[in-house]
Amino acid sequence: MGEPMIIAEDVHKWFGDFHALRGINMTVEHGEVVVICGPSGSGKSTFIRTINRLEEHQRGRIVVDGIELSHDLKNIEAIRREIGMVFQQFNLFPHLSVLQNVTLAPIWVRKWKKSKAEKIARALLERVGIPEQADKFPGQLSGGQQQRVAIARALAMQPKIMLFDEPTSALDPEMIKEVLDVIVELAESGMTMVVVTHEMGFARQAADRMIFFDEGQIVEIGTPEHFFTDPQHDRTKLFLSQILQK
Amino acid sequence: MSRSATTIEIDRPPVIRSGPLRWLKENLFSTWYNTLLTVGSLAIALLLAVLFGHWALTEAHWAVIPANLKLLFVGTYPLDQLWRIWATLYMVALFLGFSGGLHRGLILQIALMVAAATVLLALLPFAWATRLWILATALSTLVGFGLGRLTRQSRTSRWLEISLWLLSFPLTLVLLKGGLFLPVVGEAHNVGGWNKWGFMLNLLGAVVGITLSLPIGILLALGRRSSLPAVRLVSTLYIELIRGVPLITLLFMASNMLPLLVPTTFRPDIVIRAMMTITAFSAAYMAENVRGGLQAIPQGQFEAAYAVGLGRMLTTLLIVLPQALRAVIPAIVGQLISLFKDTTLFGFIAILELLGMVDSVLGNLQWRGTIFELYIFIGFIFWIFCYSLSYISRRIEKNLGVGER
Ligand SMILES: Nc1ncnc2c1ncn2[C@@H]1O[C@H](COP(=O)(O)OP(=O)(O)O)[C@@H](O)[C@H]1O
Ligand SMILES: [Mg+2]
């Protein structure tokens, strides 16, 4: 397998005086799907956002695909090209059509020809199940459709890694499945993924490893079987009992 | 019997009867004081209308308008060179038609509006020769439209369009003022500088001010939010200084103080100085309008843009500015309208624009006491232009409404 895709060593992050990440150590291998869960405010978003440097870590080391994250802007932009990210609130560009949302970065960052970018974009829209929406605007789509466009937009850059930050939390219940199906398919295709989610059914189905976060630290790491049947830590047990009750 | 079992009764929304009588009753005569107000204001309006109508029809000397039309619109521009102004108009009409043919939509509507306006204008009692000159504008629009339609498939026509519009500025200058192959108007014809060109100066000032102050304003707005402290400081200082001073003061400074500071050889003439001043003034307000739009962009838009690999520059150009400008179109157009009207302040620094021409007309003994007629006419001209601008802005808003959140 060689070098891991993502290496985090002793990663710390403060917001003012607030110590949000307190020494995160973990790695993600090529093709591995890691699911992160934990209570609200435990630092899951903050951590996943340090991986593509939407947040800057203040101590420790993060290495992505062999490149260490530093202040060097060129470095950061190079890494962001290789990492796709999907947000809880979709964050589609409302002034651009669905097709333009997906082709924007390939055209301007990868410098592809428009025809090539559009061909690949249409294939991706097909893959996420909404080929007929290409010419609509984000505001005309349902939440589930918007999130699938967001996934297609991230995939259009042909990233090596995909990050998901609670991709289904802002969705109405009847739309969660259509988005999860797309993410599962992606996981099965061998994409390296880090997914923050509370969808335990999805975790059981797709995760290679589970990570439990609490108060800015990793409390427990393990395979899904271990995690669901034999959690070691009291806080993990409590969290699981709460979340599985729902 | 059986019908009622098989057909489903559809509940229709109740139809609200809204005859004119009912509307009157509900809106104007609902209570006794409402009735009083209605009758009272009607009486006042009627009285004013009668007084004005009487004056307008019996006492007013409307002849002053057609007799001085040339003076009001183009001032001292030499008669034998008037074709150059027409040529400029035709050029703009041609380009407008061309763009309309390429894109259809709003630009075409604007082109059609202009064409329709010229046809209406030609219906007024002008001399036949003048009518032909006027109608040729509509013809240019048509020709441009045809060219645009024919070439709309080719890629080069888009580039041609952009280059034509960019070229239109120097071309206008050469056509109107002279240079290159054309004689310089003021010198060759001994009619003084271009500071006596009437309404043409209002138009030129507005167009120059509008096209320059928007990009400068955008840069200032971005500068005010820059992460570089020096850039931020300079932008903020500029915006706040300019906004703290009335335009007329700036114009006086440009006309009286600048000559003291700058040697004659480097000193731009008064019209250029006035245009620079109004641009500088308008840019500061534009910057604040744009900043309002920038502040309305959610953080998530930046993050999504960075996450797909766009740098700061591209994020600003492709994601932030388009959304920010859309959000503040009404404010920007409002700003453009006031810039247009502010060009009448040029009159205070020895520039005879439309308003300034009034004095020249009144100086003629034949037209003494026609000040009301002149001002009403000028007000009407400005109203037409400003109303068209705000109409276009409403159309833009509506067009862009598609797909907004
Ligand atoms: N930009 C910020 N400024 C200040 N505090 C923040 C910021 N972002 C997150 N936090 C704080 O950091 C903690 C972790 O946040 P987050 O990573 O969003 O948690 P999670 O995603 O696990 O719910 C929370 O207490 C939150 O209030
Ligand atoms: Mg979160």
Image (spheres, rainbow, N blue to C red):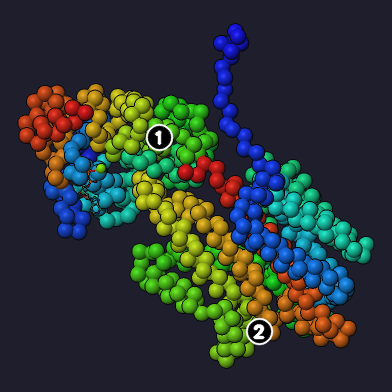
For residue A219, above or below residue B238: above
Horizontal side of residue A177 vs B207, given as left or right: left
Horizontal side of residue B206 vs B357, given as left or right: left
- Identify the residue under disc 1: A143
Q: Chain of mark 2?
A: B
**Residue A170 location, quadrant:** top left
Mark in the foreground, 2 or 1: 1
Residue at (66%, 83%) from the top-left corner? B348
Q: Chain of mark 1?
A: A
- For the residue pair B242 and B63, the one nearer the viewer reads as B63
Horizontal side of residue B58 vs B44, given as left or right: right
**Residue B133 location, quadrant:** bottom right
- For the residue pair A236 and B218, the one nearer the viewer reads as A236
| Other-residue count near label 1 (Cα within 10 Å), few / some / many at <14 / 14–19 / ≥20 | many
In the image, is the residue at mark 2 within 8 Å of ligand 1 by its beta carbon? no
User: Which amino acid is tagged 1?
Assistant: Gly
- Identify the residue under disc 2: B349
Rendered-image quadrant of the C terminus of chain A: top left
The image quadrant in which ligand 2 is located: top left
- For the residue pair B300 and B62, the one nearer the viewer reads as B62
User: Which amino acid is tagged 2?
Assistant: Ile
Count of numbered circles on the image: 2
For residue B216, above or below residue B34: below
Query: Is disc 2 in the same subunit as disc 1?
Result: no
- For the residue pair A137 and B391, the one nearer the viewer reads as B391
**Residue B82 location, quadrant:** bottom right
Q: Position of residue A111 (x, y in %)?
A: 46, 44
Residue B175 — which label? Answer: none
Residue at (68%, 64%) from the top-left corner? B41
Q: Position of residue B263 (x, y in %)?
A: 59, 89
